[in-house]
Image (spheres, helix red, strand yellow):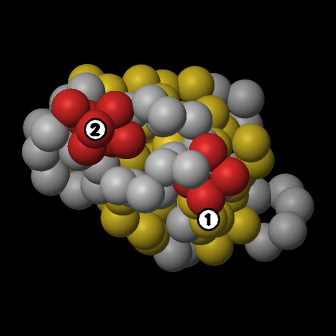
Amino acid sequence: IIPFDISDFLDIDFCACTSPNLLASFVRIGVGDAIDTRANATSQAFYVIRGSGTTVSEEHGTIQWNKGDVFVVPITQKSMVHTCSATTAHGAAALYWIHDAPLLSYLG
């Protein structure tokens, strides 16, 4: 997971963030690999830059995804597991992940 953290530039010291209310990250998943994500957020959005695979959460079940897909999940208390099944470039799937955890951190 590679966060796009510009909190220093924004002079925000309470959490990593891309804007005062959002954090965007790139998630790289090798073929056959899995990675967990978790955010204290009201929702999470994922855009599939490349590759195909699945995302599994105990609360929301299994989501199958392919290049170009967008999927959004509401509040999720537990981790989500993303697995890459195939890709045509760079040996890994790439997801763009956005959530509003910085806003919730600010609101307490």
Q: How far is mark 1 from mark 2, CA to CA?
A: 22 Å
On the picture, is 44 further left or further right than 88?
Answer: left
Question: Residue, x 44% and y 70% (percent of image)?
Answer: 34
Secondary structure beneath dot 1 equals: strand
Q: Nearer the viewer, residue 65 or 72?
A: 72
Question: Residue, x 14% and y 39% (percent of image)?
Answer: 108
Q: Nearer the viewer, residue 26 or 23?
A: 23
Position of 39 relative to 28 (above/below): above
Q: Nearer the viewer, mark 1 or mark 2?
A: 2
Position of 32 relative to 44 (above/below): below
Disc 2 marks which residue?
Answer: 106
Q: Nearer the viewer, residue 16 or 46?
A: 16
Neighbours of disc 2 within 10 Å: few (<14), some (14-19), many (20+): few
- Residue 75: percent from left, percent from top: 20, 30
Viewer can see residue 99? yes
Secondary structure beneath dot 2 equals: helix
- Residue 60: percent from left, percent from top: 20, 33
Q: Quadrant of residue 42?
A: top left
- Residue 99: percent from left, percent from top: 42, 36
Q: Amino acid at mark 2?
A: Tyr
Position of 67 relative to 37 (above/below): above
Question: Residue, x 72% and y 29% (percent of image)?
Answer: 68
Question: Residue, x 54% and y 73% (percent of image)?
Answer: 32
- Residue 38: percent from left, percent from top: 29, 55
Viewer can see residue 95? no
Circles 1 and 2 in contact, beta carbons < 8 Å:
no
Disc 1 marks which residue?
Answer: 2
| Count of numbered tags | 2
Position of 31 relative to 64 (above/below): below
Q: Quick one: label 1 or label 2, which is nearer the N terminus?
A: 1
On the picture, is 46 further left or further right than 42?
Answer: right
